[in-house]
Image (cartoon, helix red, strand yellow):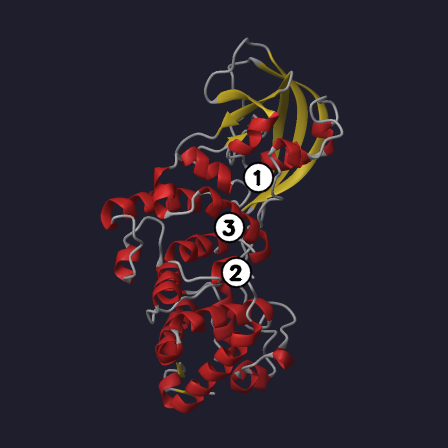
Amino acid sequence: MTTRSTTDRPDIAASPRQAAALVADLLGWFATARRDLPWRRDRDGYRVWISESMLQQTRVEAAVPYFERFLARFPTVADLAAAPIEAVLATWSGLGYYRRARSLHAAARAVVERHGGVLPSEPEALLALPGIGPYTAGAVASIAFDRPEPLVDGNVARVLSRLFVLDQPSDSARFRAETWRLAGELVRIAAPRGPGAWNQALMELGAVVCVPRDPRCLACPVKAHCRAFADGRTRELPVPKRRVPPIDVEVHVALVRDGDRILVAQRPPGGRMEGLWELPAIEPSGAGLLHAAEWPGDGALIAGDELGSVAHSITCHRIRARIFAARWTETDALQPLRFARAEEMGELGLTGLARKVLRASFARQNDPRLRGESPERFGFSVLSGGSEKPRV
């Protein structure tokens, strides 16, 4: 749909009529094909902000129940700001990337302090809030407030890379600069017809048609404008990122029961998954990638028989967790340890690994409180756990 400039950059300005036709075709398709998602039922800025924060690293189908639960518990910015961080983390538990929850909480407090509890509409004010970057600022400003601000997520980047044949690796600075430039030009062209609808249409196209593998090109509403489709290159683009090799980590996890209580440990401040709760764990290798080499409790925790194992992953870490029945030899547990009853687990911000272990059959079979019961009864798997993959 476009010509190339002397610098080999897609030049939308060279073909304004074709750009306008692209906008019209995509918005026409989106008007009838858009999915019915809970955050699309109004344009409230707070709801848009929460949904976009969740969707940055979580698939749509996984995010929906978390979004509904989060809004039920914290229906306004003021409610979120007033809540203790422990309650926010517990409600977020299972979605992963917990820094998002901490940033939401800090930003809500900033909105109350700086803006009287009203989420600002100006991109500059949004960018000044903790945890809000160009993508979230563009989403909130355009969808909630009709400002012609661009956004680029994985779906949008993939669509633009195919429409305009961007040959740079998708994790390169040049690729990022080009996708943001193109997104900015297109949202300004689409502004009279609704910048928020345009941005959502781009994301929707990437989510359901212009998908990473086996794109549905024949069903694409903008295939007539797509250079990669014309050149037969849609499967090649975007150029893959340089992959980081996985790091294998073996973790030993202690399952300590005291009647109807289970021993849990709080993650230390300043590190990965700060403040969340987990079952006591060590890395027997001593590498210290995710856990210390010694059990917490100064020798009071004694591991016994192995119960089973689970596989888990955190970013590039590929974890094999071996679960051991264990005893606690002291009368009480002191910070960072505590005993929690099964029904309390839903109120704790548990790590994904802890949730996975507690759902395992071997972790329940010896506990009379859990035997034969659905794990949902006890709160720690009310939701199945969010994916940490980019949204679709």
Circle nearer the viewer, 1 or 3: 3
Residue contact between numbered discs 2 and 3, judged by CB atoms under 8 Å: no
Q: Considering only order in the chain, which callout, 2 or 1, is on the residue closer to the N terminus?
A: 2
Circle nearer the viewer, 2 or 3: 3
Residue at disc 3, secondary structure: helix
Instruction: Please tell me which residue lies in front, 64 or 300.
Output: 64
Q: Amino acid at mark 3?
A: Phe
The residues bearing labels 1 and 3 have C-alpha atoms spaced at a distance of 18 Å
Q: Residue at x 64, y 75 (%)?
A: 216
Q: Considering only order in the chain, which callout, 3 or 2, is on the residue closer to the N terminus?
A: 3
Query: Is residue 274 visible in this depiction of the protein?
Result: no
Circle nearer the viewer, 1 or 2: 1
Query: In the rendered image, which residue does mark 2 sit on?
Result: 242
Q: Where does the image place residue 101, in percent across and percent down from the top left?
A: 43, 44
Query: Is residue 257 visible in this depiction of the protein?
Result: yes
Q: Is residue 13 left or right of residue 125?
A: right
Instruction: Please tell me which residue lies in front, 155 or 143.
Output: 143
Q: Is residue 349 above or below residue 4?
A: above
User: Please, which residue is most extreme toward the top here?
Assistant: 331
